[in-house]
């Protein structure tokens, strides 16, 4: 038939097909976008989108659609048209009113949550997304022509509840997982974009609702950020898209201001969260299904779900939480994480995830085959491949490095030794041995109480010399500041110590990625214990985040004729 001709074949123009993407929430939109490469590269496809009315999160979905810049159809108009294919990632709403072959995709992984009870809704143990009441039309016929599932076990569960609802189901795999797998070669790039360095990235996952981690343990993300050593661990918080929709950006920004100031990364609910999962070293989770993706990647997982009625027993997510260590609130987090990382066996979590995902790497290809059968078209010759995730460059801009640190610095002996162990934590009320603050960026409260004030030096912006600036800083804060330091380059600093004059500091050796401010904290602590003059060439070894940097100190004559910005005289 004419419609089955390949693009460009013969002299006749290939027949176009209109495809409707049906969106109920931002979550469902994201799932559809992950599956969209199944239709990529085919100019016969004319995509439209419509918003299903009735969701409390519809406003957020509408905003996401506006950002997509797709051709939108009002719902009532969409119900009057006919389409060559309809794609949806939720069976909720009056989808039976749409005209065309419907393909239904899961809106999450694993079908592990109980069907929510409500007016006119069942309250039994059927999984949300697999209940017959969701998957059958009012006349009892299957709602979809294709129900694309990720694992044969899901098909078995559906068939046990309702053979009619299972009739159009087929196992194709999970396009979102395939996108994560496709992005694994970019892991180092993601970590560079996130400025992770050699730190371990710990990602906390919170679903939405009364049993979510953020509801049950609201202080956990901030405690992680301020209890774990900053130069050893980086932390992030991934929230369910519905949580973003419920609070919106302004509300979330207000709620999570302390976390953001402590450097907690807060990715957006599309693509950014997935890039952070690829970059992660460890995951802490409640009962949300995102953790199954982490398990499929072989990541260490710690459970932080405190029980309830939402999680269905025996499901992949329930088995995952039973198989992994639990995050105990009464044990120091660093000890728990180090133990979990040391004892982690990737095959254990991958075995659980294998019960949620099948056909790794082929979901988009399998989905294309089924969709083109429904379209009655020959697929285009270009391969169907998952789209790798983009770099999460904006995440760090929204959660920059902290501007003030509580520092514990263990200097050998009385200052005659030359080794200092430095542990920095974002300031949180825990004092530490001293406070270090960025003089031209931190808040006034921290600047006024810091023992070490530092600045990333830009001579033109400062308008004065390092010699003048450092003297002015010590004069401005006589009751607190003992050291004023300028970071001239990653391996070179100039600092002034109260009653001790100017010092030029060069790094003789330092592993890549060591934060110069951490080294400054070590030098500051070492100088605070020293009671004699610093000889030229004095070496101070600073141990930071399991790495060692060697700083070489040289006094600079406090003479305006000797430029502190240049090599010492």
Image: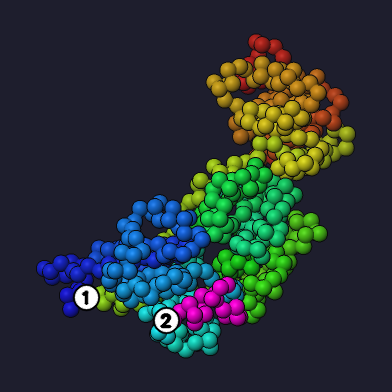
Q: Does 528 appear in magenta?
A: no
Marks 2/1: CA distance? 33 Å
Relative to the observer, which residue lies in front, 286 or 397?
286
Residue at image coords 69%, 29%: 444
Residue 4 percent across, percent down from the top left: 21, 75
User: Can residue 479 be seen by looking at this rendering?
Assistant: yes
Q: Is residue 134 magenta?
A: yes
Front in this rendered view, residue 168 or 38: 168
User: Bounds of the magenta span?
Assistant: 118-136
Task: Name the disc covering residue 4, or none.
Answer: 1
Q: Which mark is residue 550?
A: none
At x 53% / y 88%, what residue is drawn?
A: 160
Q: Which of the two discs, 2 and 1, sits closer to the camera?
A: 2
Q: Quadrant of the C terminus?
A: top right
The quadrant of the picture occupied by the N terminus is bottom left
Q: Height in image: 462 above or below 88?
A: above
**Image position, residue 447 (x, y; %):** 71, 29
Crowdedness near tag 1: few (<14), some (14–19) or many (≥20) residues, C-alpha within 10 Å: some
Residue 421, by quadrant, is top right
Direction from residue 241 to residue 554 in the image, left or right: right
x%, y% of residue 462? 59, 21
Relative to 427, is 153 on the left or the right? left
The structure residue drawn at horizontal position 52% and vertical position 69%, both measured from the top left corner, is 108
Decide if residue 227 is on the left or right side of residue 209.
right
Q: Which residue is mark 2?
A: 138
Image x and y of residue 271, in percent: 48, 57
């Amino acid at each position: 038939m004419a419609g089955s001709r390949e693009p460009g074949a013969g002299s006749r123009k290939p027949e176009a097909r209109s495809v409707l993407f049906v969106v109920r929430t931002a979550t469902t939109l994201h799932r559809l976008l992950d599956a969209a490469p199944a239709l990529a590269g085919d100019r016969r496809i004319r995509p439209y989108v419509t918003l299903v009315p009735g969701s409390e999160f519809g406003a957020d979905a509408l905003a996401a659609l506006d950002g997509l810049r797709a051709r939108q159809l009002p719902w009532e108009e969409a119900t009057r048209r006919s389409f060559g294919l309809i794609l949806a990632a939720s069976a909720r709403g009056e989808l039976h009113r749409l005209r065309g072959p419907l393909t239904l995709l899961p809106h999450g992984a694993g079908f592990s949550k109980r069907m929510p009870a409500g007016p006119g809704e069942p309250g039994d143990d059927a999984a949300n997304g697999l209940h017959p009441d969701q998957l059958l039309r009012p006349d009892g016929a299957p709602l979809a022509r294709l129900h694309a599932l990720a694992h044969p076990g899901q098909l078995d569960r559906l068939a046990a509840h309702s053979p009619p609802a299972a009739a159009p189901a087929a196992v194709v795999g999970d396009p979102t997982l395939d996108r994560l797998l496709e992005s694994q070669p970019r892991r180092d790039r993601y970590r560079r974009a996130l400025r992770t360095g050699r730190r371990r990235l710990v990602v906390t996952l919170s679903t939405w609702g009364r049993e979510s981690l953020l509801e049950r343990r609201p202080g956990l993300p901030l405690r992680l950020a301020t209890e774990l050593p900053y130069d050893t661990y980086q932390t992030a918080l991934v929230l369910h898209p519905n949580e973003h929709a419920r609070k919106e950006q302004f509300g979330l920004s207000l709620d999570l201001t302390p976390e953001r100031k402590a450097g907690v990364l807060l990715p957006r609910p599309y693509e950014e969260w997935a890039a952070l999962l690829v970059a992660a070293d460890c995951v802490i989770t409640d009962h949300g299904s995102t953790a199954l993706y982490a398990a499929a990647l072989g990541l260490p997982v710690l459970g932080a779900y405190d029980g309830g009625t939402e999680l269905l027993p025996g499901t992949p997510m329930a088995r995952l939480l039973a198989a992994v260590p639990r995050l105990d609130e009464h044990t120091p987090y660093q000890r728990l994480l180090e133990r979990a990382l040391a004892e982690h066996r990737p095959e254990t979590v991958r075995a659980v995830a294998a019960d949620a995902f099948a056909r790794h790497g082929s979901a988009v290809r399998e989905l294309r085959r089924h969709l083109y059968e429904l379209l009655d078209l020959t697929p285009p010759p270009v391969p169907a491949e998952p789209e790798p995730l983009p770099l999460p460059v904006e995440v760090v801009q929204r959660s920059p490095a902290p501007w003030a640190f509580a520092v514990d610095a263990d200097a050998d002996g009385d200052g005659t030794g030359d080794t200092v162990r430095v542990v920095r934590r974002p300031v949180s009320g825990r004092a530490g041995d001293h406070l270090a603050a960025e003089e031209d960026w931190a808040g006034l409260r921290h600047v006024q109480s810091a023992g070490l004030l530092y600045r990333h030096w830009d001579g033109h912006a400062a308008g004065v010399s390092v010699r003048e600036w450092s003297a002015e800083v010590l004069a401005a804060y006589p009751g607190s500041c003992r050291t004023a330091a300028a970071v001239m380059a990653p391996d070179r600093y100039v600092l002034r110590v109260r009653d001790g004059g100017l010092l030029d500091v060069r790094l003789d050796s330092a592993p890549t990625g060591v934060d110069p401010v951490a080294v400054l904290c070590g030098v500051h602590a070492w100088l605070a214990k020293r009671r004699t003059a610093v000889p030229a060439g004095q070496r101070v070894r600073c141990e930071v985040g399991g790495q060692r940097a060697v700083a070489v100190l040289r006094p600079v004559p406090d003479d305006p004729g000797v430029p502190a910005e240049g090599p010492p005289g």
